Image: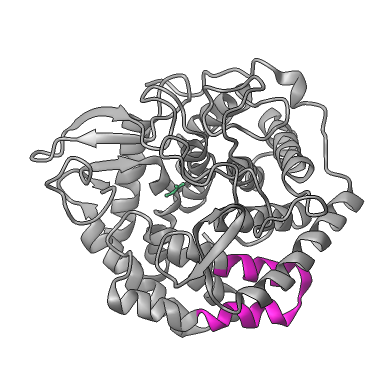
Amino acid sequence: MTRGNIELSNINRYNDGFEIPETKLNTTIKKATDKWLKKLEEFDGQFPGTMSKDDKYVLGENNSWTQGMHTGSALLAYELTENEKFLEYAKQHIESYYRRYENKVDMWCHDVGFAFSPSVIALYKLTGDEAMKELALKAADHFRTYIYSEKGGFILRSYTRKDVPDGCRTMMDTLMNIPLLFWAYEQTGEERYVEAAKSQLAITEKCLIREDGSSFHHYQFDVETHAPIRGLTFQGHADDSCWARGHSWGVYGFPVAYTYTKDETLLPLHRDISYFMLNHMPETFVPYYDYDFVEECNEAHDSSSALISACGLLEACKYLDESSEEYKIYKTAANKMVNGVIDHCMDYENKDFDGLVNWVTCSAPHNLCIDGCTSYGDYFLLEALVRLKKLDWERYW
Ligand code: GLY
């Protein structure tokens, strides 16, 4: 497939060099971190569940893909404020990651990277604690050994049930889980990690990214042979639509993969998926849960998609030439999306919700957490704010 052919249909929206004014950025950082300090005291080391109910978090254990991002949100708040209370809060969680690994709690799935990168690897990067490196390497080894299909060359959707149709799929979400494998390769030099990550990238490019730059959410493979069959959706509007959050895992995942591989073919591919997204961005710059919906409507939003994508575009800006068209477009688009979320999803004065942003939807087709709050909304708001403050920020992924 030829890549790099997608044009921006609305370039004037993205070439005015808009940047969130410094005072607005600083006020937002203060507002978010002040709220987070209070909330974390209230949560008392417990983890928000994967989604809110009536805008409130149901607190519990470290037992699913979103909890790594809760720990990571405290670390980002620490980086933004230098308030040691945030770092101490994150450190309180360390025991729970050991338990999680030892007891294999929600470890039989494609989302192991989400659990360990923004938490355990982040702690290693921030504190230099070698025990964190060792634990993250064990998680990476488990992920590589059990969740990667040698036969198909891809990360399985879930569980070790390669014999059931649902298990024999791969998905866009995996693009933000393979940084765990790239990182493990960097630390150990073991080729099996980078081979698996590169194979996943190639299969994603071939099967999940369509010629027009949009993406399937899932891709089904034959349970016997692991040969490719067809693309379909799980959390999106339709099999042939483009689920916003799944797509955003690509808008962020490909630039991360580029920094590890330096594979130049990823750049036009990333531009295509980014431009597809920007061509389908609603007026508010906060996407609905699926890019089938662009005009104002009553569909569920997904502000986390805007934030994740903004982080991806800002990551790409790190290696693009500042005078290039993409650099200017990515930087402007990232600023507009974060600005859209600040304006529409952070009304703490008039709305009582537990998270840092609302309008996050877990799964619209399953009626799960519509326009609510989630730990990935919280985490990616703070990551986007850190990135806007420090363009050269060292990411956790
Ligand atoms: N599992 C990742 C997501 O729901 O976006």
Q: Residue at x 73, y 30 (%)?
A: 284
Q: Using the image as rendered, state which of residue 363 and residue 194 is in the foreground.
A: 363
Residue 78 part of the magenta-drawn span: yes
Q: Residue at x 24, y 34 (%)?
A: 220
On screen, residue 342 versus residue 224, left or right, reads right
Q: Using the image as rendered, state which of residue 371 and residue 23 is in the foreground.
A: 371
User: Which residues lie in the magenta part?
Assistant: 71-93
Residue 210 part of the magenta-drawn span: no
Question: Whole-percent x and y of residue 258?
Answer: 49, 46
On screen, residue 304 versus residue 246, left or right, reads right
Q: What is the tally of numbered marks visible in this picture?
A: 0
- Specify whether residue 219 is in view: yes
Please identify the residue farthest to the right as the structure is shown.
23
Please say if 166 is above or below 348.
above
Question: Whole-percent x and y of residue 70?
Answer: 56, 65
Main secondary structure type of the part rendered in magenta: helix
Please identify the residue farthest to the front as the structure is shown.
54
Question: Whole-percent x and y of residue 55?
Answer: 62, 53
On screen, residue 223 versus residue 64, left or right, reads left
Q: Residue at x 27, y 61 (%)?
A: 108
- Specify whether residue 128 is in view: no
Question: Whole-percent x and y of residue 95?
Answer: 45, 84
Image quadrant holding the N terminus, namely top left
Q: Name the image colouring.
A: one colour
Please identify the residue farthest to the top as the structure is shown.
9
Dividing the picture into quarters, in which one does residue 276 lie? top right
